[in-house]
Amino acid sequence: MKKTWILSAGVMLTLAACSNAEETNTNSNAETENNMSTAETNEQNENQQSDEHHMNNDNMNHDEMDHDNMDHDNGDMNEDMNHDNEDIDHGMNGDRDSFEENAAELPAENDGASENLLTTNTKNVTRIDQEEPEDFSIEVSQTIWPATHETNQPGTVILANPDEWQQTLSALTLVHHPNDGPVLLMEDGLSDELLTEIERLAPLGNNEGLEILAATELTAEEEDMLSDYEWAEMTADSPADFAREADAAFADTLGEFPEKVLIASSEEEHQLLSMTAGSWISHMNEPVLFVDDDGIPAETEEALSERDQAKMYLLGSEEIISEDTEQQLSEFGHTSRIDAGTPVELSIAFAQFEEDGFGWGITEPGHGFVFTSTDRPELALAGAPFAHLGKHAPVLWLEDGELEDEHRDYLATIKPSFTDNPMEGPYNHSYLLGTEEDISFHTQGLIDTLMEIEAADGGGHADH
């Protein structure tokens, strides 16, 4: 079996923007004006002191101050101010609680809203409106990488087979810099449409010059189609082996193995839970490694052994990754579990989770999200790069394409609000993956409302 990989060790370059402070010089005119202002101020002070000298001192003497009463009054005043501040805090918290409670409520529907639409985008939601995985991946590519200039061309384009979800998921760690490229789904091999998109993108190559990475085995004909590009092919004998290969390849590019890793199940029944990792590994350096119902595959043990003490984040409850498996993993370092039993629960929990710089930690407004139906998991693979650039958006699963109470309750807590005017921000935005058959326009409308910034006092936009 052919197995080639041409990424060698390299160090990512981080560009830092530097700004130079400008020195402000004061001119002589400004000094003259300041001196004149000072003279005028002194004259005013002298006049004021003269006026004070003529005040009735007798009246001052007769109005004796009661210092004891004054101290007592000051104490009462401070206590009152503290109570006032507490009342303000409670009031603000109460306003926010009320705001979130109202936001989570399900509004009345307009049944005819989805008829005669000219667009399926809304103000706070961008829909990638394609049915076929190949077409979908091309539209995602064109959305994230317009490729109009060198600054928004990709480095390396990744080709993957959506039916090989474990391999494609593992390859998402290679979306990150320095590869910085889309995942194009080869549903029926390397089509002319995919090749046309690669030509449009004109990939610049990563730090090793690699322009195309096939995360699946190519035919001889497909290899010939890529003859004008610097390309490599990555294959393996099992999901765990492929994940180890992807981890090693990216570590070779970075020059080191990341300390933190995600641990997911490679079992088919846990596909959706495991694919929740895709957004994060597209966003950051951490890879995903696999366990299964039998425990830890040898390839995963080998990958973990590359780290002195790995920090492992397990996706799912003990019914997904058993307690025994977690104990075995602890021999390779520290384990933390994002404990949830369903794809919806796990995606929401992961969106909120943060520990030592790992995890999205989204608990306040000002973020993006990717919504995808549990019926179309392959779309989440191609849509994962929305976490890499733009809004850096994690995935939130929709069971059968429906927005549930858990979603509304969570999104209400991070719904943007403003005090004075909506230009204050921050703003939320979301991406919807798939057609109206996958996620209805009515569901999109609910998400759009939950993304919208509104007055904290519930007054809406009437005065703005």
Image (cartoon, rainbow, N blue to C red):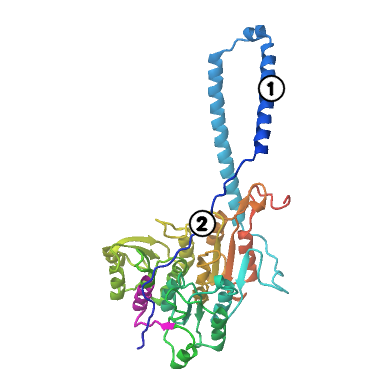
* Residue found 55% across the figure and 57% down from its top: 409
The residue closer to the viewer here, 145 or 131, is: 145
Is 363 inside the magenta-drawn segment? Answer: no
Q: Amino acid at mark 1?
A: Glu
The residue that mark 1 highlights is: 43
Magenta-colored segment: predominant secondary structure: helix
Left or right, residue 228 beside residue 57: left
Across and down, in percent, residue 377 comes to 50, 75
Is residue 397 visible in the rendered image? The answer is no
Q: Amino acid at mark 2?
A: Cys
Where, by quadrant of the figure, is residue 122 drawn?
bottom right
Across and down, in percent, residue 434 comes to 58, 75
Q: Which mark is residue 18?
A: 2
Where, by quadrant of the figure, is residue 359 drawn?
bottom left
Disc 2: CA contacts within 10 A as few (<14), some (14-19) or many (>=20): few
C-beta proximity under 8 Å, tags 1 and 2: no
Instruction: Give the CA distance from mark 1 to mark 2.
Output: 47 Å
Q: Which residues are magenta?
A: 231-251
Q: Is residue 186 above or below residue 41?
A: below
The residue closer to the viewer here, 221 or 168, is: 221
The residue closer to the viewer here, 310 or 339, is: 310
N-terminal-most mark, 1 or 2: 2
